[in-house]
């Protein structure tokens, strides 16, 4: 595992400080150069680092983006079917 911390998930800042191994602590984004966000608590630097670097929301966003594309395609298909049905109805009424 890399010793690097990912940038702050809220502001993207790289001005981070974190716990010294063996101590209870958390990652903090610099309030002076970032947003002051604090990550989850943990015992030891590796645990704190893993918790800070874990970004489950990224997977969720990717899945949501994919689902939005699927729904947009389905919506376009349904819109085309509705237009066809309306045209047929209007033609039937006109002939009627």
Image (cartoon, rainbow, N blue to C red):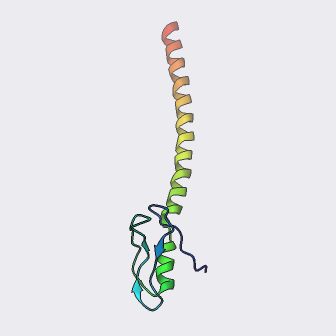
Give the farthest residue toward the front. 32
Q: Is residue 41 left or right of residue 5?
A: left
Give the farthest residue toward the top. 95
Q: Where is 76 relative to 38, above or below?
A: above
Give the farthest residue toward the bottom. 22
In this orientation, which residue lies closer to the viewer: 90 or 50? Answer: 50
In this orientation, which residue lies closer to the viewer: 69 or 42? Answer: 42
Q: Position of residue 96 (x, y in %)?
A: 49, 8
In this orientation, which residue lies closer to the viewer: 29 or 25? Answer: 29
Q: Residue at x 48, y 83 (%)?
A: 47
Q: How many marks?
A: 0
Q: Position of residue 18 (x, y in %)?
A: 45, 79
Residue 96 can be seen in this image: no
Residue 60 can be seen in this image: yes
Q: Where is 38 relative to 78, above or below?
A: below
Q: Residue at x 52, y 7 (%)?
A: 95
Give the farthest residue toward the right. 1
Q: Where is 69 relative to 3, above or below?
A: above
Q: Residue at x 48, y 63 (%)?
A: 57
Q: Residue at x 50, y 72 (%)?
A: 54
In this orientation, which residue lies closer to the viewer: 60 or 70? Answer: 60
Q: Position of residue 67 (x, y in %)?
A: 53, 50
Q: Position of residue 82 (x, y in %)?
A: 51, 27
Q: Quadrant of the N terminus?
A: bottom right
């Amino acid at each position: 595992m890399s010793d690097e911390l990912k940038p702050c998930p809220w502001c993207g800042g790289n001005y981070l400080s974190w716990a010294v191994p063996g101590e209870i602590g958390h990652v903090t984004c610099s309030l002076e150069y970032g947003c002051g966000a604090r990550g989850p608590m943990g015992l030891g630097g590796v645990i704190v680092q893993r918790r800070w670097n874990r970004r489950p929301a990224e997977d969720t966003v990717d899945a949501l983006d994919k689902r939005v594309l699927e729904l947009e395609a389905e919506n376009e298909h349904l819109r085309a079917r509705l237009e066809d049905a309306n045209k047929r109805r209007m033609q039937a009424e006109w002939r009627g």
